[in-house]
Structure formats: C-alpha cells, structure tokens
Image (tube, grey):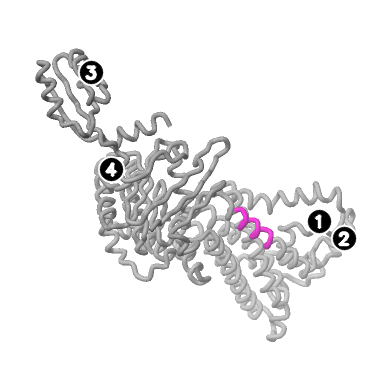
Amino acid sequence: MPVLRIEQLTKSYGKINAVDNLNLVIEKGNVYGLLGPNGSGKTTTLGIILDILRQDSGTYEWFDGQYGERARVHIGAILETPNFYPYLTAGENLEIVRQIKGASSVNIDELLDLVNLAHRKKSAFRTYSLGMKQRLAIAATMIGDPQVLIFDEPTNGLDPEGIAEVRNILSRIASLGNTVIMASHILDEVEKICSHVTIIKKGKLLATGPVGAILSNDITVEINSDNQEQLISALSDRQYINSIVPKKDWVELLIDESTDIKVLSKDIYEMGIIPTRLVARKKRLEEEFLEITKNA
Amino acid sequence: MSILSLLFLEYTKFKKNAVVSLLSLMFVIMLPTVIFIGKEFENVPPPLPNNEVFFTFPMVWDYLGYAGNWLVFFFLGLISVFIVVNEIGYKTFRQNIIIGMTRKDYFLGKVYSIIAISFCAALYYGVIAFLIGITHTEDWSMSQAFDNSWAISRFFLMSLGYMSFGLFSGFLIRRSGVAVLFYLCYILMLEAILKWAVHFRFFNNESINFYPSNCIEDLMPLPLYRFADLIPKKDIDFNFLLEYSHAAMGTSFWITVFLGFSYYSFMRRDM
C-alpha cells in the first residue's frame, strides 16, 4: 500500500526549476534513501510534502487521503536543522510536540533515554550541542507512533561521534519496520540503512527502486602488478571485461556478474603477470550514483 | 484542534519567553499606576474643576482608558508582533506545521491568543477602573459606577485592533526588527503623514478619521478631546474625533482586513 503518492510535482524559484514534474510512489514498510547532489531538489520536495512550501503545480497525497489535512500528525519529520523553542527545556519542547500531535500519553523520559538525553531533560534547548539538538529532534519524530519517518540530512554538521550515534539510532528505527524516507549525501550511510533508493537531479527523478535493483550486478575488480602498462595491454582484449580504468595505485576492471573471478586469475597467471593486488567486490552505491547522475 | 487546546498550546510556547513575560508584566504594573501621574498636575484647564475628576466616576473610565490606549498600543501590540516573528526567527512555525498542525490551526492559535489577551486586558481595565472609582468617588452608587461601562467593550475592541495590526505586521514582514519598527512607525508617524500630508490635500472631510490607527485610538481618546470647543477649528470644518459607534465600526472593519490579509498571506506563502 502506498503511503505517499506524488504526481507531476513542480516548483520553481524564478528561472530555476527546483522540482520538475516529479512522480514518485513511496510504499509502506520500506526504508528509502533520497539521493541527489546539492541543489537537486531533495529538501524542496520534502518541504512540499510537509506543507511548508507551496508547489506551482502537481499533487501529492498521504495515506490515500485517509487522514485528510491532519496526515502529518502520523508522520515524524526533521527538515534541515532541528527547530525548537530555545528557552524551553527538552521535556517542554517534547510536550509541545505531544500537544500538536494530540498524542494522549507519551513517555518523555523513555524517549529521551532512547536518544541519550535523559540527563539533560531539564536543560534549555539553547544550551545543547548540535549533536544533542539533532538527537532531540529524532526523539520528537517518535512521538505519536508515526507511520512514516522523514530525515533530511540527519548527520549534517555532526562530529564523528555524533554521526555514529545518530546512525545507530536511525538503524534501530529503520529495523522497527517503519516507513522511512532519508535524504542524505552520505551514500555509505544510505547503503547500510536503506532498502530502497530514489535518485533525483535538477528536480527530476533519475532512478528509483530497491537498492539491489539500482546497483548493477557487475563486479568491480581492483588489480595491480609491477608493470601497470603491461597489465592493461594484456587485459584489453578479454571479452568478459566491460571496462578498464587506470587508478593511481591499481587498475579498476568491471567484469560481468556471470564471470568467475578464477577466469581472470587464470588468465593473468598464463600471461606470466604476477599480481601485487587483486580485490573483487560488488559495485558501490556511490559509484552507481555518480554514473547515474553524471550525464543527467 | 479545539479553541482551548490551541490556547493552551500558545501558553505552553510563550509562558517562559522573556520578552512576552516582560511586556505582559509591564502592562499589568503600569495600567493601575501610570494614571496617578495625573495627581502631579494640580492646575487643570477649565472647564475641569480639579485633577480629582480624573479618578472619579464616570471620568475614570475615560482617563484610565486613555492611559490604557498607550499601554496596549506599546506592550500588548508588541506581544502580538513577537508571538509571530519569534516563531519565524526560531523556525518553530515551520516545525509546528511539519509536526502536524494545519496552517489554519496555527493561524487560529494566534488569533484566539490575541482575543484572549484582549479579553483579559479589558477585564483587568474594568476591575482597576472600578477600584480607582470607588476609592475616589464620594457617595458612589452601582448605577453611577457603571454609567460608562461600555468603556470595557471599547477597551476590548481597541486591544484587539492594536493586536490585529501587530499580527498583520508580523505575518506580513516576518523579520522581527523590521516588523516591530513598522508596527511602531506606522502608528506613531506614517499614518499621520498619510493623513495630513496626502489625504488632507484631496479630501478635507471626516473620511480622514477612518484610518486604522485613528479608528482604534478614538475608541479610547484623550478625555479632554470631548471638550471640542477647546480646539481651534481654523483649517478643518469637521469633527476630528469619531463617534464611538463610528470608531467601533471602523476598528471592526480594519480588524477584519488585517486578519483576513494575514490569513491569506500565511496560507499562500512558503514558510
């Protein structure tokens, strides 16, 4: 069942098309990574579906229209920076969220404990570090038992410790079976947490689907020998090699999924080349992302 | 969301806000105290017998109302600007919508707040005027005390007028410093310039009185203005003080315009 259906959504800022005729369906229970370079329209799209930006044309509908204009009560979202009342404490800020959501009973202590903020419950929000603010925002998204969670660059601006903490929390949330939409630059993060990816650039949808379907099945091989030129020349006529890209410390080969890596090992052995490096791995999301967005 | 839950939400948001608390406190302290400055002026112009008349029924309603006019304009009006621009500055207005409030509910929360504050302010004014009246008037009676009690309704409408203009300034301009400056400058200067430098050149008649700030002010004018003969009418051939009923109608019209435009703008603009 789709939780969100976006149809022909368009939004411009002057001559710039931030979102251009975007169509997208978000299915229940999946964890989506929303990917795109800076200025690709990710935040604008999220802003429109969260009703803080007005689209020029097109429509979107949450939960098949089941909750009408109160649909966002069933969504937990962080858009850009965490926004709270700076003079109120964590507990008071979460109480405001509870009132708006109309949630009858919320165990605020338990929520703060989940994000490691229980000890700062009575501190004013303005005294928090960026990482603590972000964690409080994550706690706020959990109020009212949301059916969908939206995170926009959740680890932006955090130090390595903060990133690790937020990533752990997100992994836990994702594993609970909620529908999650996460916009992020950090593709490693998306690859680890998300089941699906949606790639947009210049406001247009480039690709969407399960991570496995987006990633091609080709195998990337990192290989090197004492004489890189000889290695490249020897491998250039092999049919099962789709591409050869010389890198600084090795040569990167893309070979068919059906090809056994032993075939390559045997070939170079028979050519009398001694490999100093040989690593075979699946193609990374980052590589796929760069390829998809390169010519779009 | 219900009216009560919207009001309670606004209270939760601002009960610890330093600016709003300070402005409220100043209003509460100054309304009953500021009129006693009048005691310092022992020589009052005829036809007033002495300065005690300001503190007795029915004049106390007008005199305290006029003092309240300035205090509401400044303290309560600024509260209404702050409850909008503060949230815009902190981006909590966006967050409230993201969390699940409808834009309409958010707007109504602000409108109910200014209605509730105006109601409390008018009630407070009524109590203070009554207490000052009974402690200064000899042989007072209930009918004499409430002879001018429509003043409470006028005070309410006046407060709502100023605060609607405050909301309008906040929603229209959004930047806190500029919105406050616009609110103060319009009422203190811009309207007077528009009236006397522009309008007066084309229409030398009573229509000049129907500017927003003028309508609101005339609900609680300086009591001496009622003695219109004191004022020389050299260049104008109309009464420059509106009848209460006209001022009330004008204020109601402007409240509708301010709130209507704020709503229209808030519903359409990006946040």
- Quick check: do tags 4 and 1 share a chain? no
Q: On the image, numbered disc 1 is attached to which residue?
A: B208
Whether residues under marks 3 and 1 lie with C-beta atoms below 8 angstroms apart, the answer is: no
Q: CA distance from mark 3 to mark 1?
A: 92 Å
Q: Is residue B263 magenta?
A: yes
Q: Is residue A40 magenta?
A: no
Q: Looking at the picture, which amino acid does disc 4 mark?
A: Gly
Q: Could you say where residue A69 lies in the image, as x and y percent from the top left?
A: 50, 61
- Quick check: do tags 3 and 1 share a chain? no
Asked whether residue B91 appears in the rendered view, the answer is: no
Q: On the image, numbered disc 4 is attached to which residue?
A: A212
Q: On the image, numbered disc 2 is attached to which residue?
A: B238
Question: Mark 4 Cα within 10 Å, few/some/many (few <14, many 20+)?
Answer: few
Q: Give B188 or A282, whichever is nearer the viewer.
A: A282
Q: CA distance from mark 2 to mark 1?
A: 10 Å
Q: Nearer the viewer, mark 3 or mark 4?
A: 3
**Range shown magenta:** B255-265
Q: Quadrant of residue B59?
A: bottom right
Considering the whole magenta stretch, tell me its main secondary structure.
helix
The chain under label 3 reads A
Q: Nearer the viewer, mark 2 or mark 4?
A: 4
Q: On the image, numbered disc 3 is attached to which residue?
A: A237
Q: Give A67 or A264, whichever is nearer the viewer.
A: A264
Whether residues under marks 2 and 1 lie with C-beta atoms below 8 angstroms apart, the answer is: yes
